Image (tube, rainbow, N blue to C red):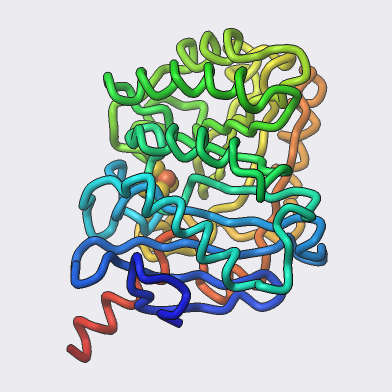
């Protein structure tokens, strides 16, 4: 598998049947600087229609959210632009039969592992990929917990400018992972200093230009965690924001914190929330778990977690 690239060593590969592969990698000889990336398709759709790459932006994660395994082994710095881009190159190399320029949508999530707004190299990657003639259908997706610090503030200011210059007309996806409308619960789940809802809403209003995709408010809704539609309506205009509700797949950390909530069909209370939010004018997306991802234990950070634990056990 190391023929895939010389930039990093592949430590482990996990198949997600019908979807793709998760890779665990590290720069040559660097024991603690590990990251995952994913080469995938949407279940049931050919790669020529939609090709999905999930690229890490940090070694580990600086945020250590309580539902995610990415931060389990600490934070060991940002990937540079070359290392982020090389994950995309490796995915392309995996499929020499496929011409990325002919794919209807080439989607890159800057989401796994790491908080992208803490790494300015992500902005450089967006600029470079926008100019790369091999990816005319490139659709970037940034998912963030909205950290409140000078680096992230500068990132979000520049991100808006890049979106307007390079990705107008709905070719950019931005998602704020809120996890709960309850401030105390949100702070417990995402233990870093963050923007408040008013600040996110203000940014969203300034973000939107004609033709842009709405910004996603993501609630990976953990067991017993509140999502109050009146709070969503109080802060966020439905013209600029949509709501996505997902389960919390069983990571080691989510299980330990009793937060896992797998559903393959939306349960009654989730359907109730959807109705309520729709009555308030919000578009709502319900993203059920995929059995392949749950059974394969392929959520963010899980391969890193498993590999390290087996090394500790046998090493
Ligand atoms: S959910 Fe995202 S920000 Fe939170 S620990 Fe995982 S990778 Fe980091």
Observer able to see residue 261: yes
Give the farthest residue toward the bottom. Answer: 314
Up-down: is 299 above or below 209? below
Q: Measuring 69% from the left and 22% from the top, which residue is drawn there?
A: 168
In the figure, is residue 180 to the left or right of 246?
left
Q: Quadrant of residue 210?
A: top right
Apparent side of residue 124 relative to residue 43 in the rendered image (left or right): left
Q: Give the quadrant of the N terminus.
A: bottom left
User: Percent from the top left, x then y, of residue 213?
Assistant: 72, 26
What residue sits 19% from the left and 64% below the top?
Answer: 32
Horizontal and vertical percent position of residue 64: 31, 47
- Horizontal side of 70 relative to 200 (left or right) equals left
Q: Is residue 67 something that shows in the picture?
A: no
Q: Nearer the viewer, residue 122 or 102?
A: 102
Q: Depth check: 125 or 264 in front?
A: 125
Image label count: 0
- Relative to 161, residue 103 above or below: below
Horizontally, residue 153 falls left or right of residue 88, namely: left
Residue 59 x/y as whole percent: 29, 54
User: Measuring 38% from the left and 40% from the top, which residue is drawn there?
Assistant: 115
Q: Give the answer, above or below, for where 145 lies relative to 83.
A: above
Q: Residue at x 38, y 65 (%)?
A: 252
Q: Quadrant of the C terminus?
A: bottom left
Residue 48 lies, in percent from the top left, at: 80, 61
């Amino acid at each position: 598998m190391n023929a895939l690239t010389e930039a990093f060593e592949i430590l482990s590969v996990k198949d997600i049947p019908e979807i793709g592969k998760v890779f665990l990698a590290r720069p040559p000889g660097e024991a603690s600087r590990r990251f995952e990336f994913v080469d995938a398709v949407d279940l049931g759709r050919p790669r020529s229609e939609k090709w999905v790459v999930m690229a890490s932006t940090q070694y580990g994660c600086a945020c250590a959210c309580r539902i995610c395994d990415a931060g389990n082994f600490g934070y060991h710095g940002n990937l540079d632009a070359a290392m982020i881009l090389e994950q995309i190159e490796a995915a392309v190399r995996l499929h020499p039969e496929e011409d990325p320029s002919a794919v209807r949508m080439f989607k890159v999530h800057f989401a796994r592992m790491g908080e992208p707004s803490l790494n300015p190299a992500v902005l450089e990657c967006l600029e470079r990929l926008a100019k790369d003639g091999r990816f005319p259908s490139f659709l970037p997706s940034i998912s963030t917990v909205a950290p409140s610090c000078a680096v992230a503030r500068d990132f979000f200011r520049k991100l808006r400018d890049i979106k307007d210059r390079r990705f107008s007309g709905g070719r950019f996806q931005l998602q704020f992972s809120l996890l709960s409308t309850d401030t105390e619960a949100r702070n417990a789940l995402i233990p870093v200093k963050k923007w408040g809802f008013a600040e996110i809403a203000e940014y969203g209003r300034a973000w939107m230009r004609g033709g842009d995709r709405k910004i996603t408010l993501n609630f990976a809704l953990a067991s017993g965690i509140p999502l109050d539609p009146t709070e969503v309506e109080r802060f966020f205009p439905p013209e600029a924001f949509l709501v996505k509700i997902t389960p919390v797949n069983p990571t080691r950390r989510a299980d330990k914190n009793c937060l896992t909530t797998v559903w393959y069909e939306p349960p009654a209370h989730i359907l109730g929330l959807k109705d309520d939010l729709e009555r308030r004018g919000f578009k709502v997306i319900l993203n059920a778990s995929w059995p392949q991802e749950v059974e394969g234990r392929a959520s963010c950070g899980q391969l890193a977690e498993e590999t390290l634990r087996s090394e500790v056990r046998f090493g």
